[in-house]
Amino acid sequence: MKILVIHNYYQISGGEDRVLEEEIKLLTSNGVEVVKYFISNKEMDLKGLVNKIKLGINTVWSKQKYKEIKSLIKEVNPDLVHLHNTFPLLSPSVYYACQVMGKPVVQTLHNYRLGCPGAMLLRNNEVCEKCISGSLLNSVKYGCYRNSRVQTVPLSTMLYTHRFLNTWNNKVDKYIALTNFAKEKFIQIGLNEDKITVKPNFIEKHIEVGIKKEDQVTFVGRISKEKGLHLLLAAWSKVGSKVNTKLNVIGDGPLRKELESKYQHLSNVNFLGKLDSKDVLSYMSKSKYIIVPSIWYEGFPMTIIESYSVNTPVISSNIGSLKEVVINEVTGFHFENNNINSLENTLKKALHYSDYDKLQRNINEQYEKKYTPSANFKMLINIYEEVVRSKKIGK
């Protein structure tokens, strides 16, 4: 099988890009030929009004990318095209190019962009679904893309245009959502239920012989409001003095200095900054718990699967996909979203939990069933084969 993988990289690389790269490695290591067509937002030329207007038009429909993808498909003749992100330089025109060339299309839904110009269903650090339940004009009103009404206009126009044309349902053969929660959100956005399948992310197991859990818990992520570290530190200031446990904070972000200053009096909190992946996994493997206190609808945090890969339970807020990926009292614990008292009580419960070994056994079972590369390859190749088979029958 030959797969053409298409992706528009963001200016700042994130989890979405990492998942894409790992998936390509997985495919090639299993004998699947992968042809890559990648473009980066670093190539955007925003100098001058003319270029900005041109970018806005191309966000809705890029004539150039339509021609390029048609030409590339003719040249490499893939069995299937797998799209990840098309915003903003590729545009939905690539779907039409694939259909004209008779190639089936699979799209992974890493975020909520098809229903939310801000992609996160988050506004003013609170969950917002106004563009799902109401008009996309709400996004312009609030300047949901980059806090700019002007920059939000072409994006909301793109979404409105292709909702009207029913592009999302007519031009894509199968969508991959990362969780059942995300699938339900995309159905609310307007995607046909029968076009969406669920396949989680994956990671290699990283258990090292002889590694023992220490009296520490760890937060890994961007230090920004939506990630909820401010809630964790507020709860920890009440719990930390009563337990012989350290809290490690790994990551950086706009709130780091403020939070470091506010909680510098806590001797059992260590702000470690950004670390490379090897060091992060080392901290994870030695920690009793990884804590994910996010206040928004996370897509599918790699942090959780990384934690599972080193057999470490997770404490998370009970919101969105987190409630699904972390199973309460099975692979970790939930606390009520955005609730400091609930987080405080959950921390106490987790740190004094008497059947920790059972949590670890459950994690191992869940990991082997859902999150190994081999399990993921089977899921992905089954999706590909089904789509290719259906396309041939359709002809």
Image (cartoon, rainbow, N blue to C red):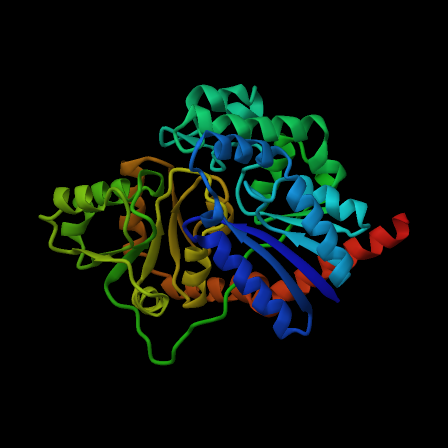
**Above or below: residue 210 compared with residue 324:** below
- The image quarter containing residue 277 is bottom left
Please, which residue is most extreme toward the bottom here? 209
Q: Is residue 110 visible?
A: yes
- The image quarter containing residue 192 is top right
Quadrant where the image shows the N terminus: bottom right
> Residue 127 at what x, y percent from top left?
43, 31
Q: Is residue 78 visible?
A: no
Residue depicted at x 42% and y 65%: 360
Residue depicted at x 43% and y 41%: 318
> Residue 334 at what x, y percent from top left?
40, 45
Residue 57 in the figure: left or right of residue 191: left
Q: Nearer the viewer, residue 60 or 208?
A: 60
Total labels: the figure holds: 0
Residue depicted at x 61% and y 74%: 29
Residue 298 in the figure: left or right of residue 374: left
Q: Nearer the viewer, residue 188 or 17?
A: 17
> Residue 137 at what x, y percent from top left?
53, 19
Residue depicted at x 30% and y 66%: 283
**Above or below: residue 66 compared with residue 358:** above
Residue 321 in the figure: left or right of residue 73: left
> Residue 322 at what x, y percent from top left?
46, 46
